[in-house]
Image (cartoon, helix red, strand yellow):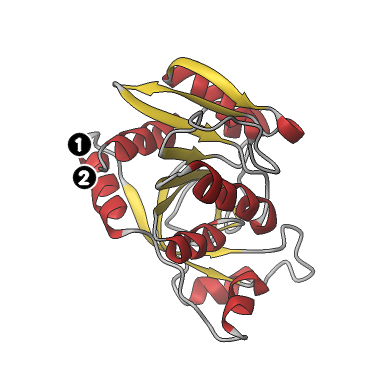
Amino acid sequence: MSLHIGAPEGAIAPRVLLPGDPLRARFIAENYLENATCYNEVRGMYGYTGTYKGFDISVQGTGMGMPSHSIYVHELINSYGARTLIRIGSCGSIQSEIKLRDLVLALSASTNSAMVSQRFGGMNFAPTADWDLIMKATQCAGKFGLNIKAGNILSSDTFYDEDPESWKNWAKYGVLAVEMEAAALYTLAARFGVKALCLLTVSDSLVSREETTSEEREKTFTQMMELALETAIGIE
């Protein structure tokens, strides 16, 4: 048991999916995992372990933003032995060619947060995904006929920005989309020598101003969920 996860030793699998929304964690457990059991309800941040095609898989909600996400990732790795962590979340497109419900694979994660730079005395660190997971996700996407957009994303500390046009500068440099957690995940994975990947579904577009509902984000981003599950079981 750790400070924020009330699971006994051995209750969490080495492969963990990380939705920000705890209700998405419950949806995955109820619809994709066999014999799923809930190991965590602390702070309403649900965590479940079950099997998928014979492989043990856990799914743990992490909340919104890098501080919350970092707490769960740190404890999953250091208290429970997680070794493959795949974030499955939503993002806002900042490129006109990336549409609502498109799948985005984050090769790297830029950030406007000080959470990463403070580890390096103000210098810049480039948080990147694990190559094996990138390759496996790409192979699985091809197998299922899924068109994924791969590239750099932005992990932002702010949801309601004082400057509503600030995303345009990131877009000029080819950044695909904005979310709030991946840079922290990739940094912690590098620090502790584990594998990490971030898969995202476009829930809204800062370009077109289209958006999905909260219920759609919880229950209908199933291509991303299935891709993450197939990727996770394909890694030793």
Q: Is residue 166 left or right of residue 197?
A: right
Q: Is residue 54 left or right of residue 38?
A: left
Residue at 64 percent across and 70 percent down: it is: 115
Q: Is residue 190 left or right of residue 138?
A: right
Q: Is residue 55 left or right of residue 48?
A: left
The residue that disc 1 covers is: 143
Q: Amino acid at mark 1?
A: Lys
Q: Is residue 64 above or below residue 49?
A: below
Front-most of residues 113 and 75: 75
Q: Is residue 166 above or below residue 37?
A: below
Q: Quadrant of the C terminus?
A: top left
The image quadrant of residue 162 is bottom right
Q: Residue pushed farthest right?
A: 162
The image quadrant of residue 27 is top right
Q: Is residue 30 above or below residue 202?
A: above
SS for tag 1?
A: helix
Residue at 65 percent across and 42 percent down: it is: 2
SS for tag 2?
A: helix
Q: CA distance from mark 1 to mark 2?
A: 6 Å
Q: Quadrant of the N terminus?
A: top right
Residue at 51 percent across and 41 percent down: it is: 80
Q: Amino acid at mark 2?
A: Gln
Q: Is residue 224 above or below residue 56?
A: below
Q: Using the image, tell me which numbered label, if any, was put on residue 139.
A: 2
Asked if disc 1 and disc 2 are in contact, CB closer than 8 Å, the reply is yes
- Residue 98 is at least partly visible in this image: yes
